[in-house]
Image: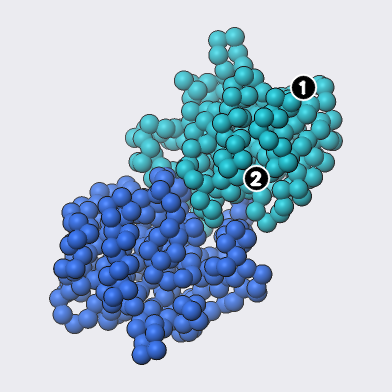
Chain colours: A cyan, B blue
Amino acid sequence: MNLLLLSNSRKPGGGWLDHAEPLIREILGAGRARILFLPFAAVNMSFDAYTSMAAERFARMGHALYGAHRRRPAALAGFDAVVVGGGNSFRLLAETRARGWLTAIPRAVRAGMPYIGWSAGANLACPTIRTTNDMPVIDPGGFEALNLVPFQINPHYTERSLRGHGGETRDDRIAEFLAMNPGVAVLGLREGSLVRVSPGARGPRASLLLGPGARLFRHRRAVRELRAGANLTALLG
Amino acid sequence: MNLLLLSNSRKPGGGWLDHAEPLIREILGAGRARILFLPFAAVNMSFDAYTSMAAERFARMGHALYGAHRRRPAALAGFDAVVVGGGNSFRLLAETRARGWLTAIPRAVRAGMPYIGWSAGANLACPTIRTTNDMPVIDPGGFEALNLVPFQINPHYTERSLRGHGGETRDDRIAEFLAMNPGVAVLGLREGSLVRVSPGARGPRASLLLGPGARLFRHRRAVRELRAGANLTALLG
């Protein structure tokens, strides 16, 4: 498998997807790729507008991008890569499921089609969206997602919290997830960092790249601080 | 109807439920009330432990409290009030639904049984839990909740956000809710504040009480800042 799972889409003050551009270029290859784009996480923007924005950005890297809202899953074989944009994870999953992409995409990606997702698009690659930070503004009809990796990503991970605020911290929330789902690891992926999964002779390999890194949370185990460059292949096992 | 819907369970530095104690005493009345307690929002604490903690707190107000995890919905008629504790809204709704309380409680409350809920317990009183801040650590089998009031509460509301963090702000999230659910109002209830619904000769009345107040969000309408003492009866219409 060939995955690029980004915590978020930009560095503070940086341009959209700029921080990951070299890795995006690498995973998409030298030719002009035909990209299927899932704009379904957009809530306060139309799917057409989100797709136009993404098409412009990927055109600057030499690729042609098309919106999945104007295609049917049977058309997937005609594309070279799947890109899933961020926004609201519940809306993303609801539309991905309703339009039939939830079963089509994993088949193609497991057969080698590159997958790039940021924020909600990284969550969608996990077994479920149970580690999203988003508000459940729409019922997705079940939390099961693409299941491309067997662990959960918490995008936009931060250990910071608002001073004097009584709500749960991010770490509280992840501890709740682990209590309810003790067999599943959670990678708290800091903004600016990403997970790269790439094919290897002895099965897929995973690594943590760029930015400030991540924290690995497991039920009843000490939290592990991971830096960019860390090998994550054991999480695929 | 007779409801007390609290944003949260304590003031910074204050004791558990202390800020609302006069109103809790008022809604429960002078006699020794038999209270049914829903501990189902607890994740990193057992239902027994959460119930013991609540029983001790309500005993100090002269009332006897029993856990719903050890009762069946048919027993509801033998109680004088329902109290729903905070924690994780998804867990709360999943258990409330699975154990049959989701249909039993609205009948009793609409017939006059007092209802007190804080945080997740305030969200449960709304049409759905779509305005919770919690992580969806378990699938509740649908987002529909008790529907005791026709508007949504966002508990722990704050307009503050982490400096330099790229995730959605609370206001972004509520705007997403309104885009997907344009007919439903959202009351962003600040910590320390609560909503009191009480029976009146011409139907139920609602008011915002205590603390720093709330913000009222409606689709395509200006946000309204509301202070403690504001009349919310129009939201019940």
Judged from the image, the secondary structure of the residue bearing numbered disc 2 is loop
B172 relative to B191, above or below? above
Q: Secondary structure at mark 1?
A: loop
Say which chain tag 2 marks. Answer: A
Amino acid type at circle 2 is Phe
- Discs 2 and 1 carry the same chain letter: yes
Task: Tell me, yes or no, whether the two marked residues, 2 and 1, touch with CB atoms within 8 Å.
Answer: no
Up-down relation of residue B155 to residue A21 (above or below): below
Q: Which residue is mark 2?
A: A40
Whichever of labels 2 and 1 marks the residue nearer the N terminus, that label is 1
Q: CA gap, disc 2 to disc 1?
A: 25 Å
Disc on res. A29: 1
- How far across and how far down the image is residue B129, in percent? 45, 58
Front residue of A55 and A76: A76
In this image, B207 relative to A42: left or right?
left
Residue A77 coordinates in the image, percent (x, y): 70, 24
Q: Tell which residue pokes out farthest to the bottom in this image.
A: B201
User: Marks 2 and 1: which is nearer the front?
Assistant: 2
- Within-10-Å neighbours for mark 2: few <14, some 14–19, many 20+: many
Q: Residue at x 65, y 74 (%)?
A: B222
The quadrant where residue A27 appears = top right
Q: Residue at x 32, y 74 (%)?
A: B110
Picture quarter with the N terminus of chain B = bottom left
Amino acid type of the residue that numbered disc 1 sits on in the rendered structure? Gly
The spot of residue A59 in percent (x, y) is: 84, 35
Residue in front for this viewpoint, A167 or B128: B128
Left or right? Give the position of B155 relative to A17. Answer: left
